[in-house]
Image: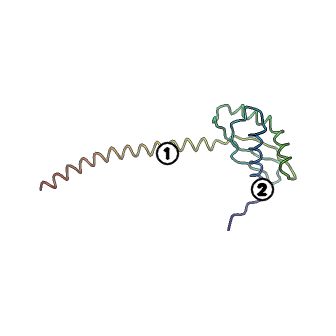
Amino acid sequence: MPKEFSRGQRVAEQVRRELAELIRLEVKDPRVGFITLTDVEITPDYAHAKIFFTSMTGQEGLDEILRGLRRASSFLRRELGKRIRIHTLPELRFVYDPSVETGNRISVLIDKAIEADRHRADETGNVADEGDAGGAETDSSR
């Protein structure tokens, strides 16, 4: 049986989709051009929404991006009201989400560890192979 989604989750997802489209197509501020909305959390009364975003540039220029988003928040809220019909339009609060950046950093560390393990295995494997070759010659000479 498929998992049921609450109305709040459906509204949050719709808000995320609409805001992403509005930011991409309608917001003219160059400071907010390279962001991706990762999640939206809405309070049960729909009064407040936390909009999580990540930036293509990482944390570089984060203050400028946040200023641009705050400046555009009233426009975004008004346009959101035209697109989504809910009783209360939430106040929008934008929050930087470092999870993508952290995930990339962890992925690089894992790749380095795997490569180091392979390198170490190759070094010990070559030594073991040479020892086995010597042992094989000794066995065949008997």
List the single residue furthest toward the left.
Answer: 142
Q: Nearer the viewer, residue 1 or 91?
A: 1
Q: Which residue is mark 1?
A: 110
Q: Residues within 10 Å of mark 1 (few under 14, many from 20)?
A: few
Secondary structure of the residue carrying tag 1 is helix
Image coordinates for residue 56, horizontal then vertical, percent: 64, 37
Q: Residue at x 78, y 53 (%)?
A: 11
Secondary structure of the residue carrying tag 2 is helix
Q: Nearer the viewer, residue 57 or 33?
A: 33
Q: Which residue is mark 2?
A: 8
Q: Nearer the viewer, residue 136 or 49?
A: 136
Q: In the rendered view, tell whether residue 59 sits above or below residue 86.
A: above
Image coordinates for residue 109, horizontal then vertical, percent: 50, 42
Q: Amino acid at mark 1?
A: Ile
Q: In the rendered view, tell whether residue 70 sits above or below residue 4.
A: above
List the single residue furthest toward the right.
Answer: 87
Q: Quadrant of the C terminus?
A: bottom left
Q: Is residue 121 left or right of residue 92?
A: left
Q: Is residue 58 left or right of residue 30?
A: left
Image coordinates for residue 130, horizontal then vertical, percent: 24, 47
Q: Amino acid at mark 2?
A: Gly
Q: Quadrant of the N terminus?
A: bottom right
User: Earlier along the polypeptide chain: callout 1 or callout 2?
Assistant: 2
Count how many numbered circles sit on residues in the image.
2
Does the residue at mark 1 contact the one at mark 2 (Cβ under 8 Å)?
Answer: no
Image coordinates for residue 120, horizontal then vertical, percent: 37, 44
Q: Is residue 91 left or right of residue 102?
A: right
Q: In the rendered view, tell whether residue 43 sits above or below residue 26.
A: below
Q: Residue at x 15, y 52 (%)?
A: 138
